Amino acid sequence: MDTTGHTVTITINKNQYQAVEGEILLEVARREKIDIPHLCYESSLSPYGACRLCMVEVVTCGKTEMTTACTVRVHRGLEILTDTPDVIRHRKILLELYLAEAPHSDVIKAMAIRYGVTKTRFLKKIVTGDPLLGRCVLCGLCVRVCNEIMGAGAIGFVNRGPYTIVSTPFLEENPACMGCGTCAAVCPTHAIGIEDTGEKRIMRSWSGTPVEMIRCAGCGGYIGPKPVMEYARSRIDPVMAEELQELCPACRRKQVTR
């Protein structure tokens, strides 16, 4: 918990908790082990409430209003209900929709089962050539992290409406991809496939885009994707000694401790 702000008392499900004024409600719930399902929240990105699964009820003067926990900022006297009948009903309908959107996602199936949802009334999405194999819920995390954190912009939303998918422009190999794998790291449904083949990292989900790997000059093992290594070196201050730049962390430690 950030201790630089003012600590306030909030109420969640009739129980009181301490939190820092201004922090995100969903972060408080996670810290206090209060179950609020979510798909699109990532602490390194600004919240935008795309998945709507984290809906909760805010109590104000005896009246309730439903909103997303990832966009609510903590303030003194905040009162929240996370498991009312209306909230549960909302989540069940959403999970049915996600079962239709991502029919092959084991993550979504597991989330749905927790709420007693085992099938969907909605038409299941079938997109020919879907690069994410029916496991994507279009939360946008991979697109946002590629743009906002890495600055690569290698992937984006393709097509419109029920035909929308995430992929590279024109579904072709994109040299802008750095092969960092950050997209896969933030994907809540583990839909993104990456394969290391030695000298190449193949971004299977991104039209098979190949990314060159760098080999350690010491042990001969592969360190990581060349674009990522160059990106990191350009931001190191002071500049790393040239004889260390082509070494893996283990060989680098051996070199500097001689």
Image (cartoon, rainbow, N blue to C red):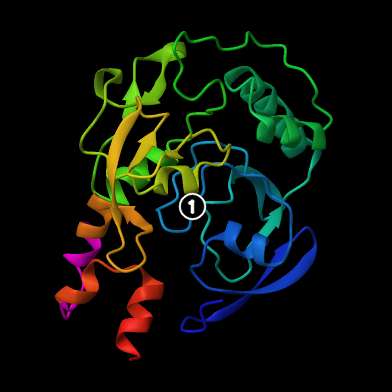
Residue 205 or residue 3, whichever sits in front: 205
Would you say 10 lies left or right of 227 here? right
Instruction: Tell me where residue 112 appears, x and y as whole percent.
Output: 75, 31
Q: Which residues are magenta?
A: 231-241
Q: Residue furthest right?
A: 116
| Residue 256 in sight in this render | yes
Describe the element under mark 1 as helix, strand or loop. loop
Q: Which residue is mark 1?
A: 42
Based on the displayed image, in which of its 4 quarters is residue 253 positioned?
A: bottom left
Q: Position of residue 149 (x, y in %)?
A: 31, 53
Q: Quadrant of the N terminus?
A: bottom right
Classify residue 99 by image quadrant.
Answer: top right
Q: 51 left or right of 153?
A: right
Please tell me whether residue 32 is drawn above or below residue 147 in the rendered image. Answer: below
| Image: 253 above or below 142 | below
- When the figure is inspected, residue 166 is found, relative to residue 258, above or below; the finding is above
* Residue 123: image location, x then y, percent: 63, 8
Residue at (53%, 61%) from the top-left corner? 24
Q: Position of residue 258 (x, y in %)?
A: 33, 91
Q: Residue at left 74%, top 58%?
A: 34
What residue is at 25 percent from the left and 63 percent from the top? 232
Looking at the image, residue 61 sits to the left or right of residue 188; the answer is right
Q: Residue 238 magenta-drawn?
A: yes
Kind of residue sitting beneath label 1? Glu
Compare residues 34 and 10 and report the one nearer the observer: 34
